[in-house]
């Protein structure tokens, strides 16, 4: 049995941790066009680089990985994916606010 292992080096801008869409596609197992669907839907955020090319940060790549796992398990529709991440974002914001209030109370 002849098994060949292939590795691809993906460079990351460590100052901003932004990846090209092609690199994000490789890391997540998604097609670039599918990533663009999630960008247009506002589920994943992107930032243009100095050349105007869209880049995705590491949090966005992790979100894409979560979406890919969801899609493999149940084939959810875009509206449901958007709802899941909207609720996740609201929960994270509430947790940050709660921690901030706890910190303020501990100073009194």
Image: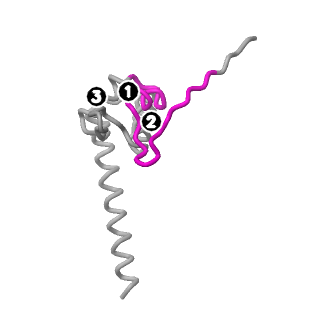
Instruction: For marks 1 and 3, give the CA distance.
Output: 15 Å
Task: Tell which of 9 and 43 is nearer to you.
Answer: 9
Q: Which residues are magenta?
A: 6-31
> What residue do we see at 30% from left, 32% from top?
53
Which residue sits furthest front? 50
Task: Tell which of 69 and 35 is nearer to you.
Answer: 35
Q: Where does the C terminus fall, quadrant-wise? A: bottom left
Badge 2 density bin: few <14, some 14–19, many ≥20, Cα 10 Å: some
Instruction: For marks 2 and 1, give the CA distance.
Output: 14 Å
Q: Is residue 52 magenta?
A: no
Numbered disc 3: secondary structure: helix
Numbered disc 1: secondary structure: loop
> What residue do we see at 40% from left, 83% from top?
106
Badge 3 density bin: few <14, some 14–19, many ≥20, Cα 10 Å: few
Q: Which residue is mark 1?
A: 75
Task: Tell which of 21 and 95 is nearer to you.
Answer: 21
Q: Earlier in the sequence, mark 2 or mark 1?
A: 2
Residue 37, which numbered label?
A: 3
* Quadrant of the rendered image containing residue 59: top left
The image position of residue 47, as x and y in percent, is 29, 41
Numbered disc 2: secondary structure: helix
Q: Is residue 17 magenta?
A: yes
């Amino acid at each position: 049995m002849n098994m060949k292992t292939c590795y691809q080096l993906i460079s990351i801008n460590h100052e901003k941790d932004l990846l090209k869409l092609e690199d994000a596609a490789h890391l997540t197992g998604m097609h670039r066009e599918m990533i663009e669907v999630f960008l247009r839907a506002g589920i994943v955020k992107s930032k243009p680089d100095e050349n105007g090319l869209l880049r995705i940060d590491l949090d966005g790549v992790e979100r894409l990985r979560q979406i890919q796992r969801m899609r493999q398990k149940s084939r959810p529709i875009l509206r449901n994916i958007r709802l899941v991440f909207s609720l996740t974002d609201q929960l994270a914001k509430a947790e940050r606010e709660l921690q901030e209030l706890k910190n303020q109370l501990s100073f009194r």
